[in-house]
Amino acid sequence: MELRKDYFADVREDGLHEIGQPRPRLDSPGHVTGKTAYFADRNFPGMLHLKMVRSPHHHARIRSIDTSEAEKHPGVVRVLTAKDVPHNVYTILILIQIGPEDETVLADGKVRWKGEAVVAVLAETERAAQEAAAKVKVDYEVLPAVFDMEEALKPGAPIVNEYHGQNYYLYDSGECRKVRFGDVEAGFAQADHILEQTYQSSPIEHAPTETTGCVVAPEGNDRFTCYTNTQAMFFTLDNTSIILQMPGSKLHFVGGTVGGGFGGKVDVIVEPITILAAKLTGRPVCFIYSREEEMQISSPRAAEKVVIKDGIMKDGRIVARKVTGYTDAGAYSRHSPYGAQKGAAHYPGPYTIPNVWIDTYCVYTNRTPSSAMRGFGVTIGDFALEVQMDKLARLIGMDPLEFRFINAYRDGDMKAHRQPTEGAALIECMQEASRAANWPVAEKYMAMSSYRKGA
Amino acid sequence: MAKVPVQFTLNGSEKAEFIESGTTLLHALRDKIGDTSPKGGCHQGTCGACSVIIDGELRLSCLTLAETCNGADIRTTAGLAEAGVLHPLQRAFLDAFATQCGFCTPGMIMAAKVLLDRTPNPSREDVVEALSGNICRCTGYEPIIQAVLTAARANSQNAA
């Protein structure tokens, strides 16, 4: 593809020497020779295997846990329950003051989703750990569960997570994240047409080829080295320090080599329990998700529901947009309150709309906790918005690309969340897309500019 | 548990180990012998990351019992470069930007090697078919297909 250097030529000083030139990746020589060291390529003598006993129920009270048979199983070294974890209730984003702590490392008294970790079994072999895990007896009292976001928000719905007290994340703005700009009702009153549509998505699993896990070795100096495929090294270090009540100076994390992440490895799940296991046994320990665990247990992208109501004029201007977004966090927050908030800022799209009203809810249900995945908070929103844009263009009989030129944000425009637009390049991207896709638009749109006044 | 002896050739070197009966070749190679180039992505024969070459055939080492490999000639990606000189497939994967996270790469290269050993001038369809048992979640496959075709061209030019 031809690289055009004339865009922004009058405001740019670089010569674009690197773009368009092949440059070898620094990690490729290791990949093609099989020498790249992933965490599971670390092997230590006497290493124990950790297997998790998981909840078979979506929502249940734990009446009792009996580990006596599992402990007697040949090869078992130790069995861990909630009482072994120094600070068992945590939340990842507490590091940036997004609380409350709402998730257990090992379930304590209750499980809130099917697959939740309840008991950790440590054994000499993977097989012994698996067999012993099957011998742990957990007595559950099954509770009513809720799987639909709007059901969860109704009065009388089962409370998923008592640490929140209600089935939504309580922002400082209230039950949802809100954006208010202009007068959206006045905008609708003025509009020639109004279109309201609902868009929904299911959870999506990243399915990396390398499953989530870590290998931990106790060092002679009372420190622990954790080889991990986390995508969030310092979140993991600091959360582990909180959960284990252990200074960060005792923890040495080695990572950076990730066999596919896509956001699926930013949660702090395997490292704290594995380091605790190494501490309590004095042995190296590995905890590696099976393929089934990767698909069923690791956080997916959140299911979302987006309701968009737009008011437009016959000439193509969008004059009002009202959006209600729902993000299904599952049973615990992880990164979802942030994702839902990001959606609130994003829903106007890259368009300048004078009247905007947005509410985004982060909702708790008894589903697998969701979290980060490539652009989470905006990806599903963009799907909804751009399908909506095509529908709006069709409604007024306008070319969908020209319709976007009319509404595209440009430098100096005020966005709905009151950040002035700077460095916009949407006009230029669409001009190039028009040429590359051979989808011509009227000359007046090809003469527009994101930053030149009047153009 | 009783141990059984197993002896085979790995990338031209004699190897002998005592293993537990039922141990997979993947486990034996990675955890006993120390060749970690085959990767365990699913341990159920669906991802291809553990692919190795046994007596010239492409095999999934996660579904192959080590004790069935007595006397076999086993090849892995770790043994592909000769005297530090990359194999044309390795060179092509580097140049074509055919690796991202790299986890599927050793298995991909094994599958491609068996293809090129049998079909030196493959069509694009041949390459797609040969790699169809290997999952890559990063690249979208296109650079990998191009790398294999490039390596095939390099091979045929060298042979000419």
Image: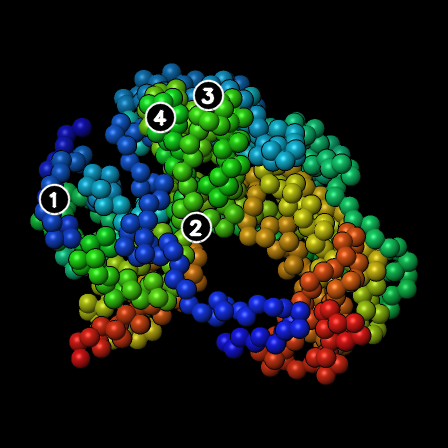
Q: Residue at x 46, y 29 (%)?
A: A272
Question: Which residue in the structure is indicated by mark 3?
Answer: A81
Judge if badges 4 and 3 mark residues of a common chain.
yes
- Real-space CA distance between mark 4 and mark 3, rounded to the nearest whole angstrom: 21 Å
Amino acid at pointer 4:
Pro
Amino acid at pointer 3:
Thr
Q: Residue at x 11, y 49 (%)?
A: B13
- Real-space CA distance between mark 4 and mark 2, rounded to the nearest whole angstrom: 27 Å
Question: Which residue in the structure is indicated by mark 1?
Answer: B15
Q: Please report whichever mark, 4 or 3, sits nearer to the chain's N-terminal start.
A: 3
Nearer the observer, disc 4 or disc 3? 4
Asked if residue A291 lies left or right of residue A158, the reply is left
Question: Which residue in the structure is indicated by mark 2?
Answer: A260
Q: Position of residue A99 (x, y in %)?
A: 65, 31
User: Which SS class for mark 3?
Assistant: loop
Q: Is residue A238 visible?
A: yes
| Mark 3 neighbour class, 10 Å CA radius: few under 14, some 14 to 19, many 20 or more | some
